[in-house]
Amino acid sequence: MNRLHLLLVTGFLTACAISLFYYKAFILRFPILPDEESQAWIVEAHISFNARGRSVMAELFIPKNYDQFLIMDESFISRGYGLSTHTENLNRKALWSIRKAYGRQGLYYRAIVHRNPVEPQKRRLKRPKLPESGLSGVKLEAAREIISRAREKSANTESFVRRIIEYLNERPASDNVKLLLGKRPDQLKKAKTAASLVIEAGIPARVAHGVFLVPLTEDAPLVHRLEVFDNGKWLSFDPGSGETTVPENFLRWWQGPYALLSTQGVYSARVNVGIQRYQEEAELSAVEEARLKNPNLIKFSLLSLPLETQSVYRILLMVPIGALIVVILRNIIGLKTFGTFMPVLIALAFRETELIWGIVFFTVIIGVGLLVRSYLEHLKLLLVPRIAAILTVVVLLMMLVSIITHLMDIERGLSVALFPMVIMSMTIERMSTVWDELGAWEALKHGAGSLFVAAIVYSVIKLETLQYIVFMFPETLLVVLALALLLGRYSGYRLLELGRFRALTRG
Amino acid sequence: MFGFLTGLKKQGILGINNRNANYVLRYNQRKYYPRVDDKLITKELATKAGIAVPELYGVIKAVGQIKFIENLIKDLNSFVVKPAKGSGGEGVLVLERTKKGTLRKPGGKVIDISDLQYHISRILSGVFSLGGHPDMALLEYRVNFDPLFENVSFLGVPDIRIVVFRGVPVMSMVRLPTSTSDGKANLHQGAIGAGIDIRTGKTLGAVWRNQIVEEHPDTGNDIVDLKIPHWQDLLLLAARCYELTGLGYQGVDIVIDRDLGPLILEVNARPGLNIQIANGTGLLPRLEKVESAFMNDVPTPDKRVEFALEHL
């Protein structure tokens, strides 16, 4: 009776999940897998610097619309700063300024970049004024020599520029090239030098800077290209290979011999560009279609929520899956952990810190917490005040970790603030009790078990495809529920019991 | 690996999932848990039913009472402090008075009154209780164990665990403290468990830290083939605990006092599974026998002991 009941309930839940999934995936045609071909990206520039308590100015180039990409939904995050944007020498610039600022400051520029769906129009550009080459003295002599060699071996502007780039990349470099490029030239230096050479030859040229739009990166490297004016249009060259086709995912950001960021009144300024594929677009189009077919389904789905709330649910929906993993690891494998679902919370914190740093921070905080706890043991405090004391120490420790790692420029350290501190304090308390009662070995075993389970949960809930599927098809959680119910009646052996009762099966 | 699994099954080993799902959850009603989780209630019920328990000297219920502890213990030569809602033997402190009048643990470690007070305050704040709930500290008679066990236990009091299923004593072991267990009789704290033949009351093989042993690691004496005194009384005592607690699946812990005979120490609603290792056999076949013998109603304690002696 009992068993039949359970089977009926789980069967019903699974049937519901499968039919909903089927309807959404095959009739409404929701994309089943995340759209790898989405043609939109979130581009974010994060500026950080230390202010000296004087007036501060920070100027950042920002991308603008052009043939390949359109900039949409720009936002600037800058607490207390005045902000203006303007166009200068064909570049767009954002200027942040403030009368007085102290300490480490952070400014953000964020935009959603779409591929321009419109075919670019072919129109002839007017030949621009020839800029200064900036070469003089010996360098000018060296440049002229390279130019005349390149001229001899080329038929038109394009082949001339290719030749120049070839010379600059020659190994071993000629003396002239060494003189112009200096030691260990990077891509930027090569692009700039090539531009000077082309200008010196009487052809307008410039350096363009940008990034490659990849699915996900925290720190996108800047890419530099040489642009040369030829016959009414600009040709773009890779300063390393001389390749003239622009990679499809190259976002042109700004041009000219300038750095991305310029500042006044600050020190150790840096800028870093993060890129992330923007998923919602592909989803939204499917949703728009679905809305026409079945308005109620969408009205009652997560997709009708504001974007920020949606991103919260993207994480929340993974929690039951994490819990299911804990069930499997505890009840089927037989691992021991502190607290039933503490590992899930730790795993959620790992999302921000990433695994290795997460484990390091967790171990450091728990370790120091245990030391403090063993000192408190001598003071003979009552339970609740003692946990409050440990909690305070944990918060102070988290703060210290954040500050120290920040000083060491390890950005991950900041996210230690997301560790569940109450749970950590309870873990310290539990661990020290287990330590006292059952010995260090048992305590470490539980601790390592918790970390191990957290790491496994983390690596599962981090799977983007899984996140996407659970978010687009929350009915998958009905299957999770059914599995949890079934596992609740699992009365077979745990894997680790095999070892425990080994003495009995040996004979 | 899966051959291993069938090996366990063949031996009739009860796994933890099986115990919880099919025995604890099925036969132990939640409402009866306080009867065993709170040792004060167990004691009161047992006294009412005429079942012998260690004498209660006092209960400390509030932090304010801790300072009067000295008064409470001044006439006692030895006593035990334990949490009323403790589990797994945690928080149990056995103390005796030295000739000088100071207190010491069985291992010889001297303890002053403030250590005792701190220990009690830890008990009250719930460090040892299930779920960390506030607790009470019990002060009770310290058992003087039967001389039989003198050679095979170290420092503490050996106790006898009998698993009682639907009122039938199904499996039993004696737990012998060792130096590693700090005088405590719990297997996971390092005590030895020696299985007892239900019919004869004689010890079978023994297990220590998941290994099979035949001698006590501290005293070097043989543990096998000891005859437990008053065996039938012990079985009856354990069987009567079914009426006492109402729990269908329970572990009854009994000590044999030199002067007072068998005393019920505590009852456990989720008895551990190591008893199977100590007995070298699984619980499942015996549980199934009981299940099929008493489908609905359970006979009297005498009949149940008789059943155990005949069929298990």
Image (cartoon, coloured by chain):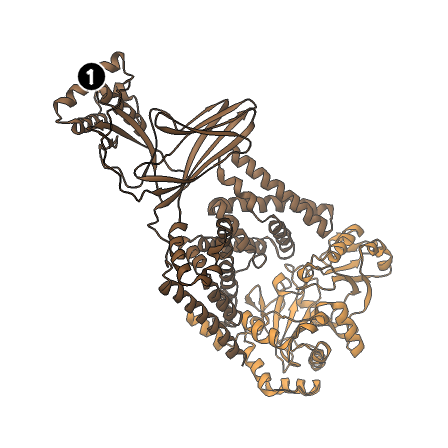
Chain colours: A brown, B orange
Residue A143 falls in image quadrant: top left
Q: Position of residue A426 (x, y in %)?
A: 63, 52
Q: Would residue A178 appear left or right of A61 to someone viewing this image? A: left
Residue B48: percent from left, percent from top: 80, 77
The residue lying at 65 percent from left, 46 percent from top is: A391
- Report which residue position mark 1 lands on: A144
Quadrant of the snapshot with the C terminus of chain B: bottom right
Q: Picture coordinates of residue A178 (x, y %)?
A: 25, 21
Amino acid identity at mark 1: Arg
For the question of whether residue B312 can be seen, the reply is: no
Relative vertical location of residue A380 with respect to residue A188 in this rendering, above or below: below
Q: Is residue A366 left or right of residue A471?
A: right
Instruction: Give the image location of residue A98, x and y in percent.
Output: 53, 26
Closer to the camera, B254 or A126?
A126
Q: Quadrant of the N terminus of chain B?
A: bottom left
Chain under numbered label 1:
A
Dot 1 surroundings within 10 Å: few (below 14), some, or many (20 or more)?
A: some
**Residue B88, picture quadrant:** bottom right
Give the camera-side residue of B251 and A166.
A166
Q: Left or right: A380 with respect to A2?
A: right
Q: Is residue A305 visible?
A: yes
